[in-house]
Amino acid sequence: MVCRVVESLALLRLRQLSVVLLQRTQTCGMDLAVIYISAYPQRLPGGSGVLPGWAIAVTEPRAEAKAVSNVTKLGYQTFYPKIIIRVRRHGQRTQIVRALFPGYFFTWIESCWTGILGAQGIAGLLMRNNEIATVRETTMQELKDRCNANGIYLDPVKPPQFQIGQRVKVSAGVLADKIGIFDGTAGQHDAVLIDLLGGPTRVLVKEGTLVAV
């Protein structure tokens, strides 16, 4: 059975996805394009099939959870990383869980994989050089280490850019060029003490708009 995936189209989609993912997570080195490029075809001696390894399954649109469930029921081991997204609905901020790699998940393949293609929600398997591409164990382990027990991807904790008490300058906005004292962070904003109205006032400015003096 021929896998229903065109490598060039899949790689193009992965590259587009990697840009979105890097912007979303603000991390480096871990996106599906990197994972895919690190994947390599593995064959048993004599070319009778694929060696055990993590393959990248492609799902139908918005069918990741269904595909994972159906492939798991067939007896395959799966890894479906997800991410928590903050969105605004009806004027309220809320959190939703989505696939870390929309349209993809990982499945462990031994020697038989054609059954996966018949599972509902599955569009195919990623190929490389006309062979099933499996992901290197080191790459998979790095991805797993960044997820919790529920498969939720955790953004690496970024070290603070400034020390509390450090002199900083606002570089943009209505307070541009104002000098103040860094006073910590609040969500996606930095707190800074600025002399306003005759005394130090704690104000919040957009993250990334402070520079060291």
Image: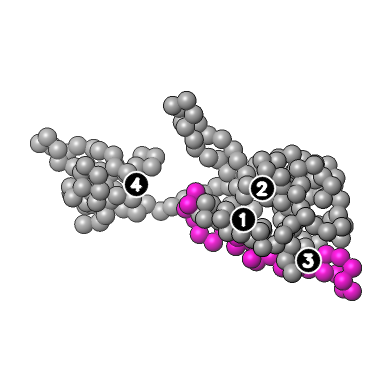
Is label 1 or label 2 in front?
Answer: 1
Asked whether residue 209 is drawn in magenta, I would say no
Residue at the spot 71% in from the left edge and 51% down from the top edge: 58
- Can you name the residue that lies furthest to the top here? 90
Dot 1 corresponds to which residue?
13
Q: Which residues are magenta?
A: 23-50
Q: Which mark is residue 131?
A: 3
Earlier in the chain: of badge 1 and badge 4, it is 1
Earlier in the chain: of badge 3 and badge 4, it is 3
Residue at the spot 82% in from the left edge and 45% down from the top edge: 119
Asked whether 191 or 14 is in front, the reply is: 14
Earlier in the chain: of badge 1 and badge 2, it is 1
Contact between marks 1 and 2 (CB within 8 A): the answer is yes
Dot 4 corresponds to which residue?
207
User: In this picture, is 192 found above or below 133?
Assistant: above
Dot 2 corresponds to which residue?
103
User: In this picture, is 134 found above or below 165?
Assistant: below
* Callout 3: SS: strand
